[in-house]
Image (cartoon, grey):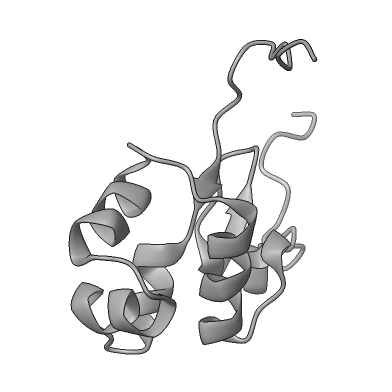
């Protein structure tokens, strides 16, 4: 059987650090909950390593979130911007009109 050919390695971004901070959870506690060492959690947060599918599911289970909420191929924006998108402010008068 021939080895699997892999293309260019695409990045995997994550919100692990943000989610931990929101829950006041240490790296050590998350590591214990998912069965890895604390250095592995740090490497995942920094993007130095990518999780296996199994580990990604275990991390998502701890946070009770779907995989798409924790991991992405595109860089995450600020959660506040996603939760509270800016709406065009129509209360201000148009100052660029004709003179």
Check the image and name the residue furthest to the front: 1
Give the side of residue 83 with respect to residue 15, left or right: right
Q: Quadrant of residue 91?
A: bottom right
Question: Where is the N terminus found, in terms of image quarters?
Answer: top right
Residue at 51% x, 85% y: name it.
62
Judge from the rendering whether residue 58 lies leftward or rightward of residue 4; answer left or right. Answer: left
Side of 55 where 54 appears, left or right: right
Q: Is residue 49 left or right of residue 52?
A: left
Where is residue 12? Give x, y as percent. Answer: 55, 39
Vertical placement of residue 71 versus 19, above or below: above
Relative to residue 90, is residue 23 depicted above or below? Answer: below
Give me the residue at 38% from left, 84% from top. Answer: 33
**Residue 26 image offset from top left, x and y in percent:** 21, 80
Q: Quadrant of residue 69?
A: bottom right
- Asked if residue 21 can be seen in this view, the reply is no
Q: Residue at x 77, y 63 (%)?
A: 90
Q: Is residue 77 above or below residue 32?
A: above
Q: Percent x, y for residue 54?
A: 61, 62
Quick check: can you spot residue 11? Answer: yes
Point 74% across, 29% down: residue: 99
């Amino acid at each position: 059987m021939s080895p699997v050919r892999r293309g260019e390695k695409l990045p995997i971004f994550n919100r692990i650090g943000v989610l931990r901070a929101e829950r006041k959870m240490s790296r050590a506690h998350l590591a214990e909950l998912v069965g890895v060492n604390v250095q592995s959690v740090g490497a995942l947060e920094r993007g130095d390593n990518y999780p296996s599918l199994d580990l990604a599911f275990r991390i998502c289970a701890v946070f009770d979130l779907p995989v798409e909420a924790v991991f992405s191929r595109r860089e995450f924006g600020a959660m506040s911007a996603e939760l509270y998108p800016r709406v065009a402010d129509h209360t201000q008068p148009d100052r660029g009109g004709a003179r």
